[in-house]
Image (cartoon, rainbow, N blue to C red):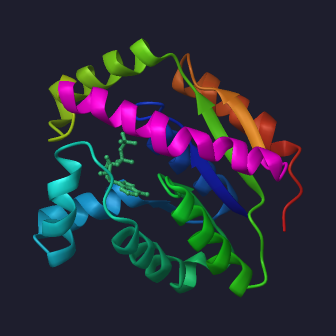
């Protein structure tokens, strides 16, 4: 099973990704988490990524693409994977196409979590109080939403034209959203 989870910042991608990946026995690959791990370890990748993340901007495609390519090449991703936070640009879509084609597989579905914009700002501000993520200040949150609308939202149409988009209402309790996702995924043929 090869899945992409899409949705604006604060849509609950990370939370849902863990459940879905667990259910299918595949790794959840979160580019945001990998970047944050590198930031806290102070690796060169982390130092580079931090400059962009703190401002709510996307890390350059070449950096992100190489990182995902290396991760997908690991043995645990051979039976499949769930991507959380990738692809976010058209160049990343094309890069991912190449990676998947090379292995003779295909993307099975693109799960899109839909949420109310003001509600996600509220969610993220609340998370800021507990998690202390450097990019959860109101200004940076608004910038992340803008960048998402400009660069990533148009990708939904790209995947929709391929018949891959499964839209799921991301508002409500975590277990309600989870149930909607599993119902939607039941209809997807697995490769
Ligand atoms: P969110 O979806 O809430 O913005 P993430 O944890 O997915 O949070 O991402 C945090 C930051 O990591 C992004 O704002 C961006 O700077 C960087 N990032 C994550 N994924 C990508 C990607 N695919 N391309 C470029 N930058 C990315």
Q: Which of 155 and 129 is in front in this view?
A: 155
At horizontal 50% and vertical 57% (from top left) the residue drawn is: 86
Give residue 63's position: percent from left, percent from top: 34, 73
Above or below residue 56? Residue 84 is below
Give residue 56's position: percent from left, percent from top: 25, 42
At horizontal 22% and vertical 62% (from top left) the residue drawn is: 49
Q: Nearer the viewer, residue 179 or 81?
A: 81
At horizontal 14% and vertical 56% (from top left) the residue drawn is: 51
Give residue 133's position: percent from left, percent from top: 18, 40
Q: Which of 99 and 2 is in front in this view?
A: 99
Q: Number of marks in the image?
A: 0
- The answer to whether residue 147 is left or right of residue 181 is left
Q: Does the magenta stretch include residue 186?
A: no
Majority SS type along the magenta span: helix
Give residue 159's position: percent from left, percent from top: 73, 50
Residue range (magenta): 139-164
Above or below residue 148? Residue 48 is below
- The answer to whether residue 54 is left or right of residue 9 is left
Task: Tell me which corner region of the image, top left, top right, bottom left or bottom right, holds residue 122.
Answer: top left
At horizontal 77% and vertical 70% (from top left) the residue drawn is: 106
- The answer to whether residue 164 is left or right of residue 94 is right
Q: Quadrant of the N terminus?
A: bottom right
Q: Does the magenta stretch include residue 162?
A: yes
Q: Quadrant of the C terminus?
A: bottom right
């Amino acid at each position: 099973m090869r899945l992409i989870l899409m949705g604006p910042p604060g849509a609950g991608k990370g939370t849902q990704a863990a459940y879905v990946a667990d259910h299918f026995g595949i790794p959840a690959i979160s580019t945001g988490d990998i970047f944050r791990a590198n930031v806290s370890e102070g690796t060169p990748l982390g130092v580079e990524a931090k400059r962009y993340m703190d401002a709510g901007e996307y890390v350059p495609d070449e950096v992100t693409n190489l990182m995902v390519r290396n991760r997908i090449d690991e043995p645990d991703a051979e039976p499949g994977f769930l991507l959380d936070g990738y692809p976010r640009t058209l160049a990343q879509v094309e890069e991912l196409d190449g990676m998947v084609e090379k292995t003779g597989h295909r993307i099975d579905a693109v799960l899109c979590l839909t949420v109310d914009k003001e509600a996600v700002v509220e969610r993220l501000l609340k998370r800021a109080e507990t998690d202390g993520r450097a990019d959860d200040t109101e200004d940076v949150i608004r910038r992340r939403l803008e960048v998402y609308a400009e660069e990533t939202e148009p990708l939904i149409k790209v995947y929709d034209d391929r018949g891959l988009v499964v839209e799921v209402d991301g508002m409500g309790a975590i277990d309600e959203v989870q149930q909607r996702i599993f119902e939607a995924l039941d209809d997807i043929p697995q490769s």
